Image (spheres, rainbow, N blue to C red):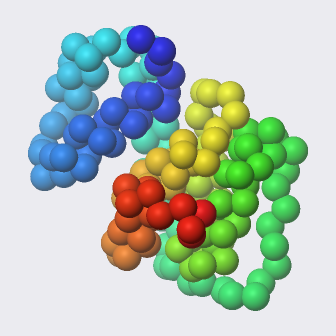
Amino acid sequence: MKENILDVLLYLFENLMIDEPESDQDRDSLQSSLLEVGFTPQEIRKAFDWLDELAELRPACEPRTLETGGPIRVLAPQEREKLDPEAQGFLMFLEQQGVLSPAQRELVLDRVIALDVGEVDVEELKWVILMVLFNQPDQEAAYSWLENLMFNHDESVN
């Protein structure tokens, strides 16, 4: 099984957070579930650390204020290396559309850099953004917009 931190996060998100959001599973039971599916303890630990850091950074994104017509964020070399060009454009598009605030964009970039993977393409970036929005209070509209984009495969917006 090709596995990395992103695979573990996607499995957790798709199978446990979305399908069973009200489930009160503790970390031990989640880890057991992940081990049963075939993920390694090291990758599971990295994924939990990634989620813990996301939760710690959450207050930095509140309150949500959108500034239109503000300066354009230039990505640092490390960020440009991590995101393929299409993913970079998509991130800018989401901010211009008001789906992501500048603070949320920074949180997304932080979480992308924290992934222990090579280059992140636009599809992987969409999942990271969904996880960030899912973790933010009062972001149901932005989350739904992106979820519709992903699962309805409406490429005209991309």
**Residue 146: x and y, percent?**
45, 64
**Residue 130: x and y, percent?**
44, 55
> Taking 121 as reference, is 71 left or right?
right
Q: Is residue 42 above or below residue 12?
A: above
Q: Is residue 102 above or below residue 4?
A: below
- Locate residue 153: give its quadrant: bottom left
**Residue 35: x and y, percent?**
27, 14
Residue shown at 38%/65% (left/top)?
Answer: 148
Residue 156 shows in the view: yes
Residue shown at 77%/84% (left/top)?
Answer: 70
Location of the N terminus by quadrant is top left
**Residue 98: x and y, percent?**
57, 79
Q: Is residue 121 above or below residue 134?
A: above
Residue 103 shows in the view: no
Q: Is residue 116 above or below residue 108?
A: above
User: In this view of the protein, which residue sits in the foreground, 73 or 25?
Assistant: 73
Residue shown at 52%/52% (left/top)?
Answer: 126
> Taking 91 as reference, is 129 left or right?
left
User: In this view of the protein, which residue sits in the foreground, 18 or 121?
Assistant: 121
User: In this view of the protein, which residue sits in the foreground, 138 or 85?
Assistant: 85
Residue shown at 73%/43% (left/top)?
Answer: 84
Location of the C terminus by quadrant is bottom right
> Taking 72 as reference, is 66 left or right?
left
For this orientation, the residue located farthest to the left is: 23
Count of numbered marks: 0
